Amino acid sequence: MDDPRTPHRSAAAATGRAAADSTGRDRPMQQRAARTRARLLAAAAEVFDEVGYLAATLDEIVSRAGVAKGALYFHFGSKGELAAAVVTAHHTAWAALAQDAAAGAPDALTGLDRMIDGVTQLFVASPVTRAATRLANEHHVIDTPVAEPFVGWIGRVTETLRAGKRDGSVAAHVVCAPAARSIVASYYGVQAVSFRLTRGSDLPARVTEWWAMLRPTVAAQPASA
């Protein structure tokens, strides 16, 4: 006698195969969409970095990305949404950099050294980072909310200084939250002056000078012999 469940199993198997086939067909489309979105973000970052939010045009962005304007509107509803996405991309890169710097460091203060070096390299090499910083300063003219600047970095530096007090690399007298705010604020001052005067070409050297002066104010002193 035939098993009455067989048709149901066959139907379920057919449905599963159809779903798998559909997923397989959709995957190249999803990959193309992801590549298009990445190209748009890269092009937008270049334009925002060069001319700022108000002067940036969607025509210039899609031209640099090499896509049609319809593709832009598939991913982003407005120039403001595109700007917000650039800022978010920077925050994602910064969070990954900070995590990597801390993970491989022998102590917390060395992790902070590496974090500062890493973000400096981002400023030099990454239009996304430069654009995000410029957009943060222009947030009042952007019609879409953008991620709050500096807060994440201040929080990360605060926690790093606290970890340094625990492992002995940061001096016991350091008050971590105010020190973190001062470090972040003064770093961005160095960055702003460098980009205003030399378009950032001297940023690594200026950061090295700045940190050589500031680091001893938070570093623990070596134990005397």
Image (cartoon, rainbow, N blue to C red):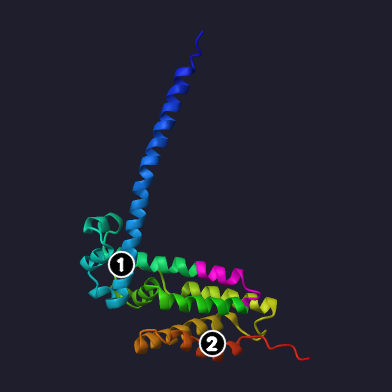
Where's residue 167, x and y in %? 69, 76
Where's residue 203, x and y in %? 44, 85
Q: Amino acid at mark 2?
A: Trp
Q: Please tell me in which quadrant of the rendered image residue 81 appears.
A: bottom left
Q: Residue furthest top?
A: 1
Where's residue 135, x and y in %? 34, 74
The residue indicated by pointer 1 is 43
Q: Is residue 6 above or below residue 73?
A: above
Circle number at residue 211: 2
Camera-nearest residue between 33 and 9? 33
Q: Please tell me in which quadrant of the rendered image residue 131 appears.
A: bottom left
Camera-nearest residue between 92 and 202? 202
* 102 lies left or right of 184: right
Q: Amino acid at mark 1?
A: Ala
Image quarter where the C terminus lies is: bottom right
Residue located 36% across and 49% down the image: 30
Distance from disc 2 to disc 1, alpha carbons, whole Å, reads 33 Å
Disc number lying in front (2 or 1):
1
